[in-house]
Image (cartoon, coloured by chain):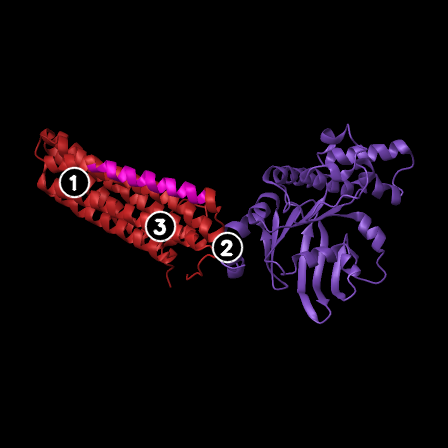
Chain colours: A red, B purple
Amino acid sequence: MKQEGHIVKSYDEEIKDIKNSIVDMGSLVEKQLKDSLQCLKDKDTEFAEKIIENDNVIDKAYNALDQSLIEILGKRQPMASDLRTIFSAIKINKDLERIGDHATNIAKRVAVAEIVLPEKPSRDIINMGEKVNIMISEVIKAFLEFSDEDAKKVWLMDREIDEEYLGILRQLLTYMMEEPKRITACTSLLYMVKNLERMGDYVQNIAEDIYYAVSGEPLFDGSSDPTWEAILPKKK
Amino acid sequence: MVENNNTKILAKDVDVFYSEKQALNKISMDIKEKEVTALIGPSGCGKSTFLRCINRMNDLIEICKVTGSIKVDNEEIISSSTDVVSLRSKIGMVFQKPNPFPKSIFDNVAYGPSIHGLADTKSDLENIVITSLKKAGLYNEVKDRLNEPGTSLSGGQQQRLCIARAIAVNPEIILMDEPCSALDPIATAIIEELIDELRLNYTIIIVTHSMQQAARVSQKTCFFHLGELIESGETNKIFTNPDNTKTQDYITGRFG
């Protein structure tokens, strides 16, 4: 939806700055997850420490954007689509910060892992994490494009993440049952896979926020639980 | 909030011309009783013109011609047989600039009830004046100086005096034409609080240039542009998710 600019041009600038900050925040979080997956792959505990420290950078960016958002609310008292955009940005910022925390948690597990993590599930977790990262990047694109349709597509991507989550969970349980010595290591991986699963849910939240900001309607009407079927393309 | 379905004012295809120039084009609107309806839109869009149709104030402008139908309590008021005096006794009006009569505070409020013969005795009249001042939230501030001139009050107090004057004749409808545009934020907040209270007993239509004020005080909002009613509906919906692009552009400050 292409819109005319505001009469007050600095208002346009402020909204543009907010959109850019969301994109920056998204990039920081993507990088955090990418790094966490890399350090899991390399079992690099030194790198893990750096990643953990880097969470401060995300928190700072979160606080700065939060401040800009409260300022624009007070100053401009946005209405209609502007109001929905700012309202969504507040929530998206918070969810991105949370995704950053979950990414950091993966690095934290690597940092304390004194035991050798089993290869196969580690690899699967890295694959799953890469998919989550694609979701993050796609949801930020949907925000930038201000597209409710794209947001919906990202929302649906979480189905695959949930399936992988269950698959890896089963795999880890089997490992643990086969060899109780692996329980500690597998528990670490279990936490990681749960972190990734949660990230997928946060991306879904963001997709819902974008959908509302663009269309003014909730992605779900509240009459039923959010289900895949509710927004899957209708069968012809 | 209880949904009310009682129509107080029903406008249908109202056209207004000032000589050749058309100021309103086929305005149709259903105004519910005991609700606040806000009329918004850029200057010259016709919102005040529409407001003045309701109490036939446009009659005072010679070149102004109103056609179509407006029913108040199901009675046609755009007709040569309409009893304008009785219509106006049903409708109070408050203007942009507080305009108290050059009389005492007491007489400002007593004037209407006196000429409409609403009070039989002096104490009846006193009662009406005091009650009206109380309803307008002004009584406590002026009770010791009722004989001082109305013009000695502050702007916000004068506006509340005008509201007291309007409600003294026991109207059912109050028309407000930018009642706060000459007031400071505190005086504005007091008037807005008053509108909230008055809504329980009166049907209120307010013209305002403040989008935030419309969002705060009204239940229904109507957006006018170039003499047309572009969109009307629940205030909450208009300010979060309007249907029409023009409404959207106007309330977000994209044109004016």
Q: CA distance from mark 2 to mark 3?
A: 18 Å
Q: Amino acid at mark 2?
A: Gly
Q: Position of residue B167 (x, y in %)?
A: 77, 41
Q: Tell me, yes or no, if residue B200 can be seen here.
A: no
Task: Look at the numbered disc 3 and give the secondary structure of its residue.
Answer: helix
Same subunit under labels 3 and 1?
Answer: yes
Name which residue type carries label 3.
Answer: Asp
Mark 1 lies on residue: A171
Q: Give the image quarter of residue B82.
A: bottom right
- Chain letter behind tag 2: B
- Judge from the rendering whether residue A144 lies leftward or rightward of residue A104; answer left or right: right
Q: Which residue is mark 2?
A: B253
Helix, strand or loop at label 2? It is: loop
Q: List x then y, in percent, for residue B74.
A: 77, 55
The reply to whether residue A112 is in sight is yes
* The residue stretch that appears in magenta: A54-73
